[in-house]
Image (cartoon, grey):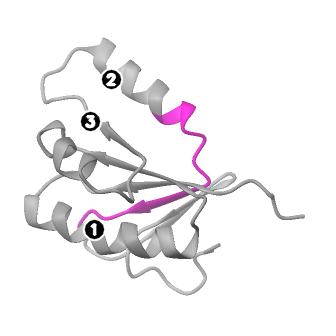
Amino acid sequence: MPSLEPPSILVIRRRYLGDIVLLGSLFRNLRLHWPQARLTALVEPSYAEVLALNPDVDAVLPLPRSGAGLGSWWRALRALRRGRFTHVSIWITFPRPRCWPAGRVRLCAPGCSTSCPTG
């Protein structure tokens, strides 16, 4: 039986200002499809403020900076777990698109085959 709770969606795009700005249309379309969804972005710290200006983004999680201590990474991992994401969209360049089964979470990279589950 499908959950009645709105989805919690994590969008991962680490870097490149132009690509971060272009995520605006993705977030807009997600918001139109799932008005009650919680939309979160995971980006490098220098781009967190850009996405914080987008009214369709509910939260921005910055990745720890390069060379950050282990404590920073543990805090980031705890924040990801607290998000209890039902969907994860990965916008990172891969040699070819991939989908990963990850328990109850859907991990889908752009260009996945149609067998990649969508909600």
Quarter-of-image position of residue 98: bottom left
- Vertically, is 109 above or below 80? below
Indicate yes or no whether the magenta region holds residue 74. no
Quarter-of-image position of residue 69: top left
Which residue is rendered at x = 50% and y = 85% of the image? 113
In the rendered image, which residue does mark 2 sit on?
A: 73
In the rendered image, which residue does mark 1 sit on?
A: 24
Q: Residue type at mark 1: give it.
A: Gly
Nearer the observer: mark 2 or 3; the answer is: 3
Residue at mark 3 to residue at mark 1: CA–CA distance? 19 Å
- Vertically, is 103 above or below 34? above
In the rendered image, which residue does mark 3 sit on?
A: 63
Pick the quarter of the image with the C terminus.
bottom right
Nearer the observer: mark 3 or 1; the answer is: 1
Q: Which residues are magenta?
A: 80-93
Q: Nearer the viewer, residue 110 or 32?
A: 32
Indicate yes or no whether the magenta region holds residue 81. yes
Q: Residue type at mark 2: give it.
A: Trp
Q: Which is nearer the N-term, disc 3 or disc 1?
A: 1
